[in-house]
Image (cartoon, helix red, strand yellow):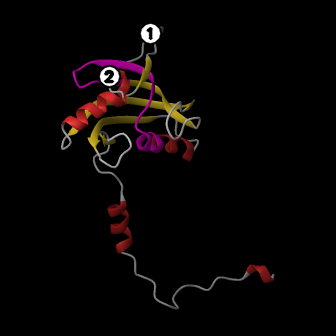
Amino acid sequence: MATQEIGQELGSKLSVATFGWNKPAIQKVVLANQEERHFLARFVGVATGVKPYKIKEGDRAGEVDYGLQGMFEGYGPSGEVVNGSVLYLPKYVNDMVVSAFSATDDVASIRIGFDVYATYQEAAATSYVFSVNDLLNEKPAGLEDVKSIVAALPMPTSGSAPKLEDKSKK
């Protein structure tokens, strides 16, 4: 990512819409080719906080959600590059980053690198769903990692669990 010079314009808001991917445009490409994962944009940068905003339309209109604040670059499918100081990602990915900020006061910044795709899904209200590839984490810590750690522990048997002291009688 380019360094931010003193006095340089901070940039604008970034999302897939920055590269022309509004709802009708995404629907057009996913309906034309329902088998393909359609690349929409790549976003890289450093998130340093969150920016609250009110959702304007849809089932969640009026609810508060959050964009990411920081220094970001977005890359469109045609090679265009746009700098931004606020980034809006698909909700499930955005929520993961926002939750990292709210989990502890020790987090000053979070590096991100994501490729965002749209894929046809008949059951979706929009006819598509977003999917995101994390470019910075080679191996996500998921259920299989947790299962492999827990597998080494012996399974409790009936009667082996310690009895809990009833503190209500004291």
Q: Give SS at disc 2.
A: helix
Judge whether 59 appears above or below 81 on screen. Answer: below
Judge whether 8 appears above or below 147 on screen. Answer: above
Give percent across and percent down for residue 5: 42, 12
Q: Is residue 84 magenta?
A: yes
In which quadrant of the rendered image does the N terminus lie? top left
Tag 1: amino acid:
Gln
Give percent across and percent down for residue 64: 58, 36
Residue 167 lies left or right of residue 112; in this view the side is right
Q: Nearer the viewer, residue 12 or 122?
A: 122
Residue 1 seen by the camera: no
For disc 2, the marked residue is 19
Tally of numbered tags? 2
Q: Nearer the viewer, residue 145 or 3?
A: 145
Give percent across and percent down for residue 18: 36, 22
Residue 120 lies left or right of residue 7; in this view the side is left
Tag 2: amino acid:
Phe
Question: Picture quarter containing residue 35?
Answer: top left
For disc 1, the marked residue is 8
> Which residue is at 30% across, 27% downward?
25
Q: Which residues are magenta?
A: 73-96
